[in-house]
Amino acid sequence: MDADIAEILLRQEQIQARVRALAGEIAAVYDGDARGLTLVPILSGSIIFLADLIRELPLKMKIALVHVSTYPGTATSAQEPHTLVERVGDVRGRNVLILDDILDSGRTLRQVQAMVAARRPASQRTVVLLRKVRKAPRDVPVDFVGFDIDDLFVVGYGLDFGDHYRNFPHIGILRAELMP
Ligand code: IMP
Ligand code: MG
């Protein structure tokens, strides 16, 4: 696996430090808020980020997983249609925090944000570990961002290419000859 990575963009230790700081920013917003918190993580890319972030968050929370397929197979640009599988249920009166690995075209988050908004939560915010800053659309608000990155296709720390490399502990760029 490691031999397929051309360059490491963000090392494991660097990601961990940022995730810890991000947890501090998030805890400061929700601390003391009596309304319950429901985290809505978008599978599968957010699994590692989710696992690391929630263990740094000393808040009582529910977790409602959502599955959206954006890049079917090994395509590296977003394709329609997106499929959405969710069991978010009733979040009226609760604070909802949507969590995703990366904000690219914004189609995934736009869809999940609309689904959550229709359920009329008390508040709604979004956290992403990575944002492709030059592509991120203005109509998809994000409240917490781990790192702004260039428009590169990255893998590792949950992010995949053809469902591989999610377990690579750093965030890196694949060797060019492996990309379509
Ligand atoms: P968007 O809908 O175009 O914003 O894409 C968001 C989703 O596409 C993310 O949840 C990721 O699963 C996937 N994605 C976007 N960019 C990358 C990337 O660079 N590497 C791996 N997956 C990506
Ligand atoms: Mg994803």
Image: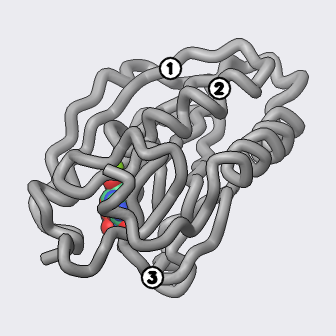
User: Extreme bottom residue here?
Assistant: 134
Q: Which corner quadrant of the image does residue 153 belong to?
A: bottom left
Decide: marks 3, 1 in contact (CB < 8 A)? no
Dot 3 or dot 2, earlier in sequence: 2
Q: Quadrant of residue 64?
A: top left
In the image, 124 versus 175, the foreground residue is 175
Image quarter (top left, top right, bottom left or bottom right) of the C terminus: bottom left
State the residue at coordinates (34%, 59%).
3
- The answer to whether the residues at label 2 and label 1 have Cβ atoms under 8 Å apart is yes
On screen, residue 59 versus residue 64, left or right, reads right
Q: Earlier in the sequence, mark 3 or mark 1?
A: 1
- Residue 157 lies, in percent from the top left, at 48, 46
Whole-angstrom CA distance, mark 3 to mark 2, is 27 Å
Number of numbered discs visible in the structure rendering: 3
Q: Residue at x 50, y 20 (%)?
A: 63
- Residue type at mark 3: give it: Asp
Query: CB of residue at label 1: within 8 Å of ligand 2?
Result: no
Whole-angstrom CA distance, mark 2 to mark 1, is 10 Å
- From what the image shows, is residue 55 above or below residue 136? above
- Residue under label 2, please give it: 54
User: Gap between marks 3 and 1, in whole Å?
Assistant: 30 Å
Amino acid found under the numbered disc labelled 1: Ile
The 10 Å Cα crowd at callout 2, few under 14, some 14 to 19, many 20 or more, is some
In the image, what residue occupies the spot 38% across and 64% down?
A: 5
Query: What element does badge 2 sit on?
Result: helix
Which callout, 3 or 1, points to the residue nearer the camera?
A: 3
Q: Badge 1 is on which residue?
A: 63
Can the viewer see residue 104? Answer: no
Q: Is residue 12 left or right of residue 108?
A: right
| Amino acid of disc 2 | Ile
According to the image, label 3 marks what residue? 151
